[in-house]
Image (cartoon, grey):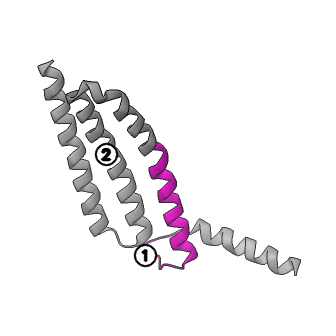
């Protein structure tokens, strides 16, 4: 039982490190789209590891924590996608280092189709 608590503590520490990396990524990335990507991927893994570590420390909470993990796995990518689309719709500037903007190409095609319908 003690080994489970020690493993849970190390897994929780790993999750905390990933959350730290996510916050550093938010500061270092050049535009909102890269910040969303860095924040979502690292914070999702950090949250999952932290929750799993807590579940190993408190085994009686494990079922509830597994439900939280499933919720995080579903909601984080969806919310990240929605934030990215909203930022693009609001015409947030893209970094000069960004080479391809596929969403802009799709938007141009839809705009041209709408103009042709009129």
Pick the quarter of the image with the C terminus.
bottom right
At a point 41% along the width and 65% down the height, the residue shown is 34
Q: Return the x and y of residue 48 as percentages of the image width and height.
A: 33, 41
76 is within the stretch colored magenta? yes
Residue at left offset 54%, top offset 70%: 86
Q: Mark 2 highlights which residue? A: 47
Foreground tag (2 vs 1): 2
Q: Is residue 88 magenta?
A: yes
Q: Few, some or many C-alpha atoms within 10 Å of disc 1 (few <14, some 14-19, many ≥20)?
A: few
| Residue 34 higher or lower than 13, as above or below | below
The residue identified by callout 1 is 95
Quadrant of res 69: top left
What x and y, as percent, mark residue 108?
A: 69, 75
Looking at the image, is 21 positioned above or below residue 29?
above
Q: Single out the residue that lies furthest toward the right.
A: 117
Q: Nearer the viewer, residue 30 or 75?
A: 75
Residue 113 locus on image (x, y percent): 81, 74
Q: Quadrant of the N terminus?
A: top left
Q: Residue at x 61, y 67 (%)?
A: 103
Choose between 66 and 19: the one closer to the eye. Answer: 66
Q: Residue furthest top?
A: 1
Q: Secondary structure at mark 2?
A: helix
Q: Which residues are magenta?
A: 73-99
């Amino acid at each position: 039982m003690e080994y489970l608590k020690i493993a849970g503590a190390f897994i929780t520490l790993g999750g905390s490190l990933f959350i730290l990396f996510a916050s550093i990524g938010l500061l270092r990335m050049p535009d909102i789209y890269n910040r969303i990507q860095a924040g979502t991927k690292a914070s999702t893994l950090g949250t999952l590891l932290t929750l799993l570590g807590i579940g190993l420390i408190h085994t009686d909470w494990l079922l509830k924590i597994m439900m939280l993990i499933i919720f995080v796995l579903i909601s984080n990518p969806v919310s990240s996608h929605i934030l990215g689309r909203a930022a693009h719709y609001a015409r947030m500037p893209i970094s000069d280092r960004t080479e391809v903007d596929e969403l802009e190409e799709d938007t141009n095609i839809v705009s041209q189709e709408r103009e042709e319908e009129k």
